[in-house]
Image: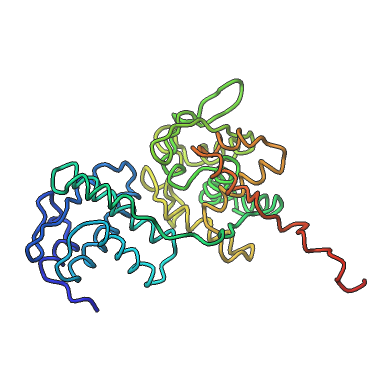
């Protein structure tokens, strides 16, 4: 258990005390955290960076007489690795510290030379590639057809699963989807000018079967403007003018459980959409446009191009038992 000075606890835990002129810990003054959060557009990124900065502050206060430099940040990386955090998690923590150093230098609280040294601290190495989760075409078809369309909730859930599987949207994009996004382009329905991760804008084609599922929900719910998807209360009535991302998570978990799939997340449906498009002959560039990836390497990870489990290379190698 770390012995944290009271003033450091207040800085790390109390949102009101996160100010540009941060409290002192001994004789030191913390770099600013508010400019770091203000420079991020995504609420998820802000939440992640706030948590990462708080953790760094707690560790920083627990060590005697530290200065904010490259050596200290390297020690912090070693501390994260000793906690056996995943490389991706540790690198997110370090990215927040690097941004903290950049903003501190920009406001004159840290010399540019020290900030440059901190930004050169290498992240944790990733050894190997984690295996993603993809649905086959039959599993994906069964999943979005499970909801009971005789109920209002069933119509909504079917439309949500259809959009996730057919259009490859993120769950945050699904909750932000409005009727104004649905427009005709080149005699085809599309989600136009969708603002995705990092503020990137893209247009997503909408298959006819997905549009039909959306129309069934909109007609039954009598939604004529605003957000496409809304909360449905236990009495079977539309409640409110929007819904949270947690609703998307619970819907996917509910119907995946009925199929006997224990670990299926909303992002796995986006990943499945990418692979199914590729299996059907879709061009890699077009799939990249569909998903809104800046780098084609990210799209390749979604497709699982590096390793194939159906007809795997070691299935028939001449040493298996005779039939």
Image point (24%, 46%), residue name: 102
Horizontal and vertical percent position of residue 239: 38, 48
Nearer-the-camera pick, 106 or 50: 106
Nearer-the-camera pick, 236 or 137: 137
Q: Is residue 225 left or right of residue 97?
A: right
Q: Which residue ends up furthest to the top in the rendered image? A: 186
Horizontal and vertical percent position of residue 105: 19, 45
Q: Is residue 78 above or below residue 147?
A: below
Q: Is residue 91 above or below residue 79?
A: above
Q: Is residue 200 left or right of residue 51?
A: right
Q: Is residue 85 left or right of residue 270?
A: left
Nearer-the-camera pick, 120 or 260: 120
Image point (55%, 51%), residue name: 154
Horizontal and vertical percent position of residue 261: 61, 64
Name which quarter of the figure residue 94 lies in: bottom left
Horizontal and vertical percent position of residue 151: 55, 51
């Amino acid at each position: 258990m770390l012995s944290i000075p009271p003033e450091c606890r207040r800085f790390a835990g109390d949102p009101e005390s996160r100010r540009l002129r941060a409290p002192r810990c001994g004789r030191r003054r913390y770099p600013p955290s508010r400019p770091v959060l203000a420079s991020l557009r995504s609420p998820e990124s802000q939440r992640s960076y706030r948590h990462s900065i708080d953790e760094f502050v707690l560790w920083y206060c627990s060590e005697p007489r530290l200065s904010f430099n490259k050596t200290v940040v390297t020690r912090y990386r070693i501390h994260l690795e000793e906690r056996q955090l995943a490389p991706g998690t540790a690198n997110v923590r370090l990215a927040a510290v690097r941004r903290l150093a950049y903003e501190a230098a920009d406001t004159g609280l840290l010399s540019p030379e020290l900030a440059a040294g901190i930004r050169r601290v290498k992240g944790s190495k990733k050894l190997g590639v984690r295996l993603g989760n993809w649905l086959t075409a039959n599993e994906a078809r069964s999943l979005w057809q499970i909801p009971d369309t005789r109920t209002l909730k069933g119509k909504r859930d079917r439309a949500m699963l259809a959009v996730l599987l057919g259009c490859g949207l993120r769950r945050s994009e699904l909750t932000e989807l409005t009727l104004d996004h649905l427009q005709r382009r080149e005699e085809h329905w599309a989600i136009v000018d969708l603002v995705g991760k990092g503020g990137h804008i893209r247009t997503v084609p909408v298959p006819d079967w997905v549009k039909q599922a959306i129309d069934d929900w909109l007609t039954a719910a009598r939604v004529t403007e605003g957000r496409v998807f809304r909360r449905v209360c236990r009495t079977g009535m539309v409640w409110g003018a929007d819904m949270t991302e947690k609703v998307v998570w619970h819907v996917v978990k509910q119907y995946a459980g009925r199929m006997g799939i224990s670990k299926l997340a909303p992002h796995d449906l986006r990943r499945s959409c990418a692979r199914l498009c590729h299996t059907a002959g879709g061009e890699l560039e077009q799939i990249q446009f569909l998903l809104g990836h800046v780098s084609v390497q990210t799209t390749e990870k979604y497709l699982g191009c590096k390793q194939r489990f159906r007809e795997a290379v070691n299935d028939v190698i001449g040493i298996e038992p005779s039939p």
